[in-house]
Image: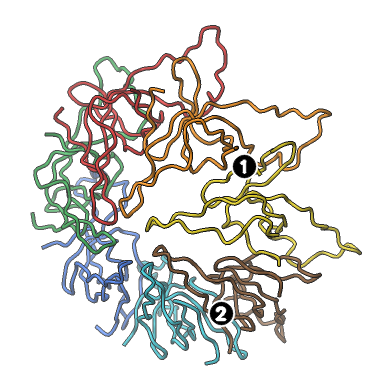
Chain colours: A yellow, B brown, C cyan, D blue, E green, F orange, G red
Amino acid sequence: MNIRPLHARVIIRKQEEETTTAGGIVLPGSAKEKPTQGVIVAVGPGFTLESGEVRELSVKVGDKVVFAEYAGNVIKHEGEDLLILNESDIFAVIA
Amino acid sequence: MNIRPLHARVIIRKQEEETTTAGGIVLPGSAKEKPTQGVIVAVGPGFTLESGEVRELSVKVGDKVVFAEYAGNVIKHEGEDLLILNESDIFAVIA
Amino acid sequence: MNIRPLHARVIIRKQEEETTTAGGIVLPGSAKEKPTQGVIVAVGPGFTLESGEVRELSVKVGDKVVFAEYAGNVIKHEGEDLLILNESDIFAVIA
Amino acid sequence: MNIRPLHARVIIRKQEEETTTAGGIVLPGSAKEKPTQGVIVAVGPGFTLESGEVRELSVKVGDKVVFAEYAGNVIKHEGEDLLILNESDIFAVIA
Amino acid sequence: MNIRPLHARVIIRKQEEETTTAGGIVLPGSAKEKPTQGVIVAVGPGFTLESGEVRELSVKVGDKVVFAEYAGNVIKHEGEDLLILNESDIFAVIA
Amino acid sequence: MNIRPLHARVIIRKQEEETTTAGGIVLPGSAKEKPTQGVIVAVGPGFTLESGEVRELSVKVGDKVVFAEYAGNVIKHEGEDLLILNESDIFAVIA
Amino acid sequence: MNIRPLHARVIIRKQEEETTTAGGIVLPGSAKEKPTQGVIVAVGPGFTLESGEVRELSVKVGDKVVFAEYAGNVIKHEGEDLLILNESDIFAVIA
């Protein structure tokens, strides 16, 4: 990947989730912000604490992650839409 | 559980509480944000203080907890809806 | 009490105050947020300073306290409505 | 006084100031928040700095102080309305 | 002066500036918040840094200062209207 | 370049990206804030941490960067429009 | 100059920029906040970090600077309108 995110940012290749439910049942919590999944393709060097220490991110390239639907910005890179967001917008890593 | 929450996040399996009262009496404080109960199924590594120290969370897998009704995000995992939220949104552990 | 509040939270059993005044006189300051009284039934371990130190709360179980009327959340516990709030929402202890 | 304010809070017995001016002249600055005077009847132990140090308040019981009109909360104590506010809402001590 | 401001507050005797321009020309920048001048009559002990250090104010009694028009609160003292504001609302000292 | 940005600011020569898609297909994510590309022509000395340390920026003159569309301010310099923004508004460096 | 700005403030003599373009072409980015130029005529001693250290400003008297159009306050000094603003509102120094 020839994009280098700054600080605590990561670049994600989004994976579309099926959101239609068989039978059209309304999901509990569906009014909330809908998390989305993707795979990390690039990570920044980390975030800087007030002490001056740079703390490495908790995710790495290849991690499949869950994040808030409206987080981050879409960037177009080599004809592909990628998402760039802060690690703090990532909820969890799926093993 | 094959989901690993980041930082101070936890994953909760919600438990529905009965909210109808026999006789239809209006509960005092019922206009406030309604807390909800659930069981913790995964916890993050902790939150980072400005000193650089990572402080472990105060809850562990299996804890039954009370939290604010509209906190967190629903994630769909292996066909089940789980809730992901920050430890700071958890009010108390029920022994 | 089998509920353990996290961090700087406390659990309070509210005590209703008489708010009607004989003769219907308007109280000075009555338009302000009305404080409420209660007794503390459980306290959290304390709040974490940026230095990493956990500072114990200034109130203990049994303390009769005054707090802001709209602070906190009602939780239903063993058929009783209790209030859970942050120590910072407590104004004073009544000796 | 059998009320013990927490942290940086103080309890004040308000003193009504005359606000009518002879001749009905509009006071310069009268559209601003109107400060009020009172006497301190109880003080909290102080505020906690991030370093963990507790810093004593700059006012003591008996001090006559000036504070913002809409600061604080009224509490009813032994049939008397008292005001509870943060030291940061006090502007000055009148010698 | 028998008023002692707390922390970083100062008390100022306002000096009215002429604001009418001969010929009624609109001043550039006149739509902005209009600074006002005055003389400092009392200063607080200083502001407390998170390190616990109290840092003395940069102004002293007798300084002629420029400050934002709508900053601070008017207090009536010995029949005189004085202004109480934070040192941070003072822009500059006029030598 | 005879402009010296202060602190964590950088100056960027914007590069227009083609935004029309052949066939007029609506891009996914196009409702989000659209990132823009440019080349860095000047960088500030860095940002100051509370510890007093000045931390150098993570970008250098010549870097091709991606940033949020509405970040920063346009300055006219030697007949050319340049963009001045904070390093925190830069998402990534394109290698 | 007989005005002494406090802390991180500077005083600027504004220089009007030509904003009309020959031929009436709409400038790209013209909807953004328009930066303005001026010369620094006085600087404050610097800003105080939480560590207690006073950090000198990065600009000096005589520097030609670019700043946001609506930053700061106009003060009238010896018949002249000057601008007083925080160093953080200055984007860059023009060499």
Task: Please report the residue visible at 55 percent of the width from the left and 58 percent of the height from the top.
Answer: A57
**Residue C24 in view, yes or no:** no
Q: Chain of mark 2?
A: B
Which amino acid, by three-letter code, is at mark 1?
Ile
Do labels 1 and 2 touch, CB within 8 Å? no
Residue that badge 1 annotates: A3
Residue that badge 2 annotates: B59
Q: Chain of mark 1?
A: A
Q: Secondary structure at mark 2?
A: loop
Q: Secondary structure at mark 1?
A: strand
Image coordinates of residue F37 in percent, x first then y, are 60, 32
Image coordinates of residue E30 in percent, x first then y, are 34, 27
Q: Mark 2 Cα within 10 Å, few/some/many (few <14, many 20+)? A: some
Frontmost residue, D76 versus E53: E53
**Residue C26 in view, yes or no:** yes
Could you tell me which quadrant the C terminus of chain C lies in?
Answer: bottom left
Which amino acid, by three-letter code, is at mark 2?
Val
Q: Is F68 above or below relative to D75?
A: above
Task: Please report the residue visible at 19 percent of the width from the left and 34 percent of the height from the top.
Answer: E16
